Image (spheres, rainbow, N blue to C red):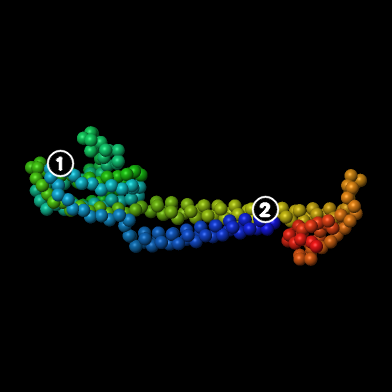
Amino acid sequence: MTRKKGFVLFLTFIVFLNASILFHNSIKRIFIVQEKKFQIQLSYESSLAYGEYVYFYTNAGEDDKFRWEFSGTNNYVGITVFALTDTEFSKFQNLQTFYCYSLSNGSYYIASGTFIPPSYDTWYIVFLNTDSDMQITYLTYNVVVDRGDDSLFEEIFIPIISTIIIGGIIAGAVVYSKKQKKKREVEIVSEIKSGPKSSESRLSKMEYDLKYCSQCGTPQKMNAIYCVKCGNKFD
């Protein structure tokens, strides 16, 4: 009995500990989203000759947003901007045919925009000097990633559901244990009152006499060592 109670208390402690950590992280996450604190915000500067490129990449989901912008010092040099996955970027680096999302067609030396990744993947934003006169420019480019709200479900609601399930299992185990204990008490009392039913039982009449627990008052067999209800040991 004592071990079962200790186990139940231990599981209950784990559930409440998990719930408190989850609550803290949930509140923190909600405030971050409400205050619109971007997880990634980077700014770079680079000198680009004709055919040279710079890029930014990160793992992204469908609800993420990439807000990009660039500004070149040479207003005669247009910059091509495109987005592509990890696989397509590898093809691009190896001068193979690749598929990409065009964000700027190379007609501007200053531009900005927003790209929403269509899939969960590693996405690259590439800034490429495609100037037809093969001139050099000094480029400043900035990328801001707004994480989507889908991560809220993963970080908050899934752990909440898991905690509820674990708590339900523990509560069910406690209720079942109490029912089994009550059922056993009823069986013992019934057995004590009815006495031996046949000659098959060779136990003495003393085993069917009644005694009561000094701690909780539950009726017991005379040969009982521990109380079936509270676990008290008889002298």
Whether residue 107 is visible: no
Q: Do tag 1 and tag 2 residues touch (Cβ < 8 Å)?
A: no
**Viewport quadrant of the C terminus:** bottom right
Q: Residue at x 33, y 47 (%)?
A: 59
Q: Relative to residue 23, is residue 132 drawn left or right?
A: left
Q: Is residue 8 above or below residue 102?
A: below
Q: Relative to residue 203, is residue 57 drawn left or right?
A: left
Judged from the image, the secondary structure of the residue bearing numbered disc 1 is loop
Q: Relative to residue 178, is residue 43 drawn left or right?
A: left
Q: Relative to residue 76, is residue 5 drawn left or right?
A: right
Single out the mark in the foreground, 1 or 2.
1
| Spot occupied by residue 27 in the image (x, y as percentages of width and height) | 43, 62
Judged from the image, the secondary structure of the residue bearing numbered disc 2 is helix
Q: Residue at x 18, y 44 (%)?
A: 53
Q: Is residue 59 above or below residue 38?
A: above
The residue type indicated by label 1 comes to Gly
Front residue of this view, candidates 121 and 231? 231
How many residues crowd mark 2 within 10 Å: few (<14), some (14–19), many (20+)? few
Question: Disc 1 marks which residue?
Answer: 51
Q: Residue furthest top?
A: 96
| Spot occupied by residue 222 in the image (x, y as percentages of width and height) | 84, 58
Front residue of this view, candidates 63 and 24? 24
**Viewport quadrant of the N terminus:** bottom right
Whether residue 3 is visible: yes
Question: Disc 2 marks which residue?
Answer: 176
Q: Residue at x 66, y 56 (%)?
A: 3
Locate residue 98: give its quadrant.
top left
Residue 164 disc label: none
Mark positioned earlier in the residue sequence (1 or 2): 1
| Spot occupied by residue 56 in the image (x, y as percentages of width and height) | 25, 48
Q: Is residue 37 above or below residue 65?
A: below
The residue type indicated by label 2 comes to Tyr
